[in-house]
Image (tube, rainbow, N blue to C red):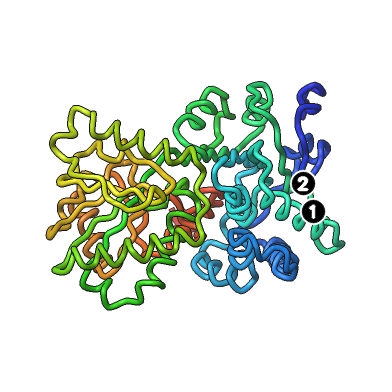
Amino acid sequence: MQINSDVLKKIEFLVGSEDYLLSSDKTPCRRIFDDNVVYFLDKVAHVLLSDSKNRSYSDVIAWAFWIRKASILSEKKRYESKLDSKLGRGVAFHIAPSNVPVNFAVSLVSSLLAGNISVVRVSSKDFIQVKIICEALSLVLKQDAFKELSPYIIIVRYERDKEISSVLSSIADLRIVWGGNATVSEFRQFPLKPRAVEMTFPDRHSFAIIDADAYLKEDPKRIAELFYIDTFFTDQNACSSPRAVIWCGHSVEKGRAVFWENLERLVEEKYDMEPILAVDKLNSFCELTLSEESSGFVVKKEGTDNRIVRVVVNSLPEDLMSYKMGGGYFLEYITDNLEDVVPLCSKECQTVSYLGVDPEKIKALVLGHGLYGVDRIVPLGHTMDLEFYWDGYDMIDSMSRNIDVLRVSAKI
C-alpha cells in the first residue's frame, strides 16, 4: 500500500505504527472470537482493573469489566453456530465521536472480535481515558503471547484533514462512522472500495417511560443514581441518554415530585455544570416556546435549579425532539395511554428506558405500528450498558462475513 509521506507526517500513532498501517491490507483476517484476541482483551482488562488510579474513571472501569474473558465468552455462546463460518472483512476504519471518550474502545473491541484489522481515529480532544486505554493496549501488545496481534490495532489521531480521511477510507473494507449527522455526511464524500461496507451511527434521541406507582415502591435515592448514570454522566451527549420522561400511573404528581427532588439533590452534590450549558438550556426553551407549533404543546418550565430544566408539554408532535438539549434538560409528558409516544419513535429514536412498565408492551407498540425507530428497550439505569447490539446492528455479525459452503447430492 502506498500512502504519501506528507500524509503520514500529519498522523499521530497512539497505538501501532506507520509500518502496520502501510501493510494493513496484507494482514490476514481472523475468525470471530479468536482465542488469542479473547485472551488479549482479558489481559488488558486485568491491567486496567489492577491500577487503583483508574477507579476515578468509571467509563474505563466499565469497559474493562466488559472485556474480561468471562464476559466475552458469555457473549460468544450466542455465536456458536457461526464460529466455523465467519471471518473478518479486512481493514476496518473507525471514526470515533468527540463526546464519548471510551466509545473508540467499544468500537475497537467489536471489530477485533469480528476478526478485523482496526484503524481507529480518536477525537482530537485530549481525553485522559483515551490515554489510559491506549497505554494498556500498548503494554499488553509488548508481551510475547500477543505480539502477533500488533498489526490488528492501529489507533491514530489527526486534526480534521480531508486528505488523510480520504486515504484511510480508500483502504477500508469496512468503515464505521460515529459522531452525528454532520460527521456521517463529511465522510460520505470519501469513496470506499466497491465491496466495502459502511456502518453509520448518526444523531439519535432516546426517552424514558416511568410508571409513578411502581416508582414510589422503589428506593428513590437508588433510582436517582440510576437515572444520573443514564443522563448526567455524559451530559446527555450519548444518543442513548433520555431527553424526555414520559409519566404514567395513578400517582403521577407525587411520583414526579419525589423523583425530581431526589435527582436534584444528587445533581447538586455530584454534577459540575459548565456555565455555557445554562445559556444553552435557556436558548433551547426559548426556541421551543417561539416555534410555530409551540402553542400546541408547550406548557411550562419547571425546576428549582438551572442544573435541571424541565419543560412540561401537553402533546408529543413528531418534531418535538428536534428541540432537545443536554446537560440536564428534560421534556416531560403525562399520559394514561402508551400509544401517545408513537410520534417520538421516528428513525432518530434509539433507546426507550423503562421503570414499572412491561417492556413487551413497548416492543409490541413498535412492532404493531411498524415504527422506523426504537432499537433498544432497556431498564432505567442501563441505557449506557456496553453491548454487541447497537443502533439495530449486531456488531459482530455486521463487521464480519460468512463463508458459505453449498453441498449437493452426487446424483443429478
Q: Residue 163, how many percent across, how many down? A: 67, 21
* Residue tagged 1: 138
Residue 370 appears left or right of 222? left
Q: Which residue corresponds to the image point at 21% horizontal and 72% vertical from the top-left?
A: 213
Helix or strand or loop: what does disc 1 sit on?
helix
Q: Which residue corresponds to the image point at 44% horizontal and 38% vertical from the top-left?
A: 202
Residue 338 appears left or right of 205? left
Residue 171 appears left or right of 365? right
Amino acid tagged 2: Val
| Vertical side of 251 occupied by 104: above or below | above
| Vertical side of 279 occupied by 269: above or below | below
Q: Nearer the viewer, residue 117 or 211?
A: 211
Q: Which mark is residue 147?
A: none
**Residue 154 seen anywhere in this rendered image of the structure:** yes
Give the CA distance from mark 1 to mark 2: 6 Å
**Residue 379 seen anywhere in this rendered image of the structure:** no
